[in-house]
Amino acid sequence: MDNRKGVISRTTGETDITAVLDLDGSGVAAVDTGIGFFDHMLNSFAKHGFFDLSLSARGDLIVDSHHTIEDTGIVLGKAIKDALGDKAGIRRYASFAMPMDETLVLCAVDLSGRPYLSYDLELTTPRVGYFDTEMTKEFFYAVSYAAEMNLHLRQLSGSNNHHIIEAAFKAFANALHLATRIDERLNGDILSTKGSL
């Protein structure tokens, strides 16, 4: 399919965010949220999902990181939805287990049009760098609902919070990459007995 790009801008009293996402890229990213560890995670998402991502976020970091991270999730989710269009020909479902040293995180997605997040990560420190670890769940919740996808994240092993969060982002990237691939056997149809997603 040509031009599977999502372009979303969102401005509120708390944040100003623009994202351009190409589902058929090569993993090139230009990300600036003002939160170093979060930038690292979004760069990893792009690299390991073979997505081209340009994302700029300005938020009220003087308050905390909550609004910036949550609203970035909303914008990224909408960009995914925008890039997918009518979802004709995509595989729709995928899962990926990401090992990272002592950590193993499973991600499964269904690009169903029905949002849901099942989240099972055990984070034991309040922060990694300037990233509030409790925002990991809020980010993935925002992505799943804005993209209208079913998203499951399950920690199978792990103790290092940096590894757990990074494995979650990389597992999500890989699962999303697989689910968004075009399957020629569908002949441009939608993988649903209902005929739409």
Image: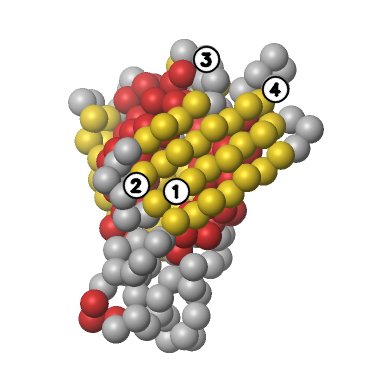
Q: Position of residue 147 (x, y in %)?
A: 54, 56
In the image, which is nearer the foreground, mark 4 or mark 1?
A: 1
Give the residue number, with chain letter if any, for mark 3. Answer: 130
Check whether the beta carbons of the residues at disc 2 and disc 1 lie within 8 A of each other: yes
Q: Quadrant of residue 52?
A: top left
Looking at the image, which is closer to me, 86 or 127?
A: 86
Counting residues from the N terminus, which is met first, the one under dot 3 or under dot 1? 1
Q: Residue furthest right?
A: 13
Position in image of residue 187 (x %, y %)? 29, 83
Q: Position of residue 162 (x, y in %)?
A: 37, 22
Q: Secondary structure at mark 1?
A: strand
Mark 2–mark 1 distance (CA, rounded to whole Å) = 7 Å
Is 97 placed above or below 37 here? below
Cα–Cα gap, marks 3 and 1: 25 Å
Decide: marks 3, 1 in contact (CB < 8 A)?
Answer: no
Residue type at mark 2 is Phe
Q: Which residue is mark 2?
A: 51
User: Is 91 positioned to the left or the right of 5 in the image?
Assistant: left
Above or below residue 83? Residue 14 is: above
Q: Amino acid at mark 1?
A: Leu
